[in-house]
Image (cartoon, helix red, strand yellow):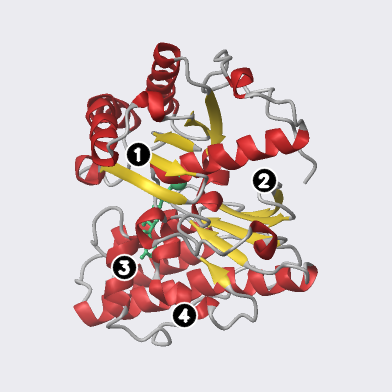
Amino acid sequence: MIVLGIESSCDDTGVALVEDGTRIIASEVASQVARHAEFGGVVPEIAAREHLLAIEPLYQGVLQKAQISLPDVDLIAVTQGPGLIGSLLVGLSFAKALALKSGKPLIPVNHVHAHVHGALLDLPQSTSLEELFPCLALVVSGGHLNLYYMKEVNRFRLLASTIDDACGECFDKVAKLLDLGYPGGGPLERLAQAGDPLHFPMPTMMAASQDLDFSYSGLKTHVVQLIRKITNHGKDPLSPETKAHLAAAFQEEALSQIVRKLKTALQNHPDSKNILIAGGVASNQRFRELLSSLDTPAIFPPPAYCVDNGAMIAASGWHEWQSLVQAEPDFSLDQLKRFEWDGFSRYDFLATRAA
Ligand code: KG4
Ligand code: ZN
């Protein structure tokens, strides 16, 4: 089954064609990073307008690259939320227009769940889903930090999330303090390679907490106060060595907090066969090193698919479709030709599955 995936929830426009939830036929992303860099973060109004400019040529380019035309597509999947409403509406309206014009079925997709399904893209063909589940799944991006226990591919039981900042968001904020630009996760990781993570002791976050929730505000505040002290309240510059040490120490604790929580979650859920890890921070190499200390294997999306993209949306649409058919064998694609949902309302035809 060929699924067209459309993503526009934040500042990346993504369009992709994916076969049977795993094989990427073609995928293109138009990044708006350069457009928002001067503001140090995403400006929602600009993001929506940029999606409007990008989406049609991106869609045409993907079809052309794959040598596939719309009649060959079996299902259209689109991000319904969560996200910036102006941005979401561009993708939603575009997808609805395509579906109405072509008579193709359309399925709404949860962006955060789709990150997890992105980790199932391009797995070796011999891998069956039964081998992968039950598992833990972690979405660690600029906007989200969620940990799930998943019995099956579409059953998301939320175990924990951040009580303040998302991890990627905190990387971006600390990167800004170190003048690394936006988004700062990648540049901060590169700078950290030259630093000593033990040079500046960092607080151990959530050390006293019994639950699995994450927190980043204390770590961020610690770095802010440390920089104030080192620079004599901004009067002295930070040397390149000091910046590298700060980056390395911050990164080590930011990532170690997640690894500690994963260890506890694995103790609580010993039947977990894997940990699916997705979201922009999943591309961090030090994170991958730290995760290799766990006994349970971690599975990542291909590096280019850690950040927002259309392929994960197509994959998620396919897995949703599979679950609908499993729950109700008579469910037909025609039942997905009701387009009355929007960026606010919950869609009711996706059965609420017990996690
Ligand atoms: O998944 P994504 O596109 O964002 C959301 O959907 O929210 O991920 C972007 C986030 C940014 O915060 C970025 O700084 C962070 O992922 N990021 C990284 C790295 N590459 C991207 N954080 C740490 N290390 C990296 N190498
Ligand atoms: Zn995302």
Which amino acid type corresponds to the residue marked 4 in the rendered image? Glu
Disc 3 from disc 1: Cα separation: 25 Å
Q: 192 left or right of 109?
A: left
- Of callouts 3 and 4, which one flags the residue occurring earlier in the amino acid sequence? 3
Q: Which amino acid does the dot numbered 3 rest on?
A: Leu
* Residue 84 or residue 325, whichever sits in front: 325
Q: Position of residue 75 (x, y in %)?
A: 50, 29
Q: Amino acid at mark 1?
A: Gly
Eyeballing the image, is 69 above or below 130?
Answer: above
Question: What whole-number distance in Å separates the C-alpha atoms at marks 3 and 4?
Answer: 16 Å
Q: Secondary structure at mark 2?
A: loop
The three-letter amino acid code for the residue at tag 2 is Asn
Apparent side of residue 192 relative to residue 314 in the rendered image (left or right): left
Contact check, label 3 and label 4, Cβ < 8 Å: no
| Circle 2/circle 4 CB separation < 8 Å | no
| SS category of the residue bearing label 4 | helix
- Marks 3 and 2, how far apart in space? 34 Å
Q: What number is the disc on residue 94?
A: none
Camera-nearest label, 4 or 1? 1
Q: CA distance from mark 2 to mark 1?
A: 22 Å
- Picture coordinates of residue 246, whole percent (x, y): 35, 76
Q: Is ligand 1 less than 8 Å from the beta carbon at label 3?
A: yes
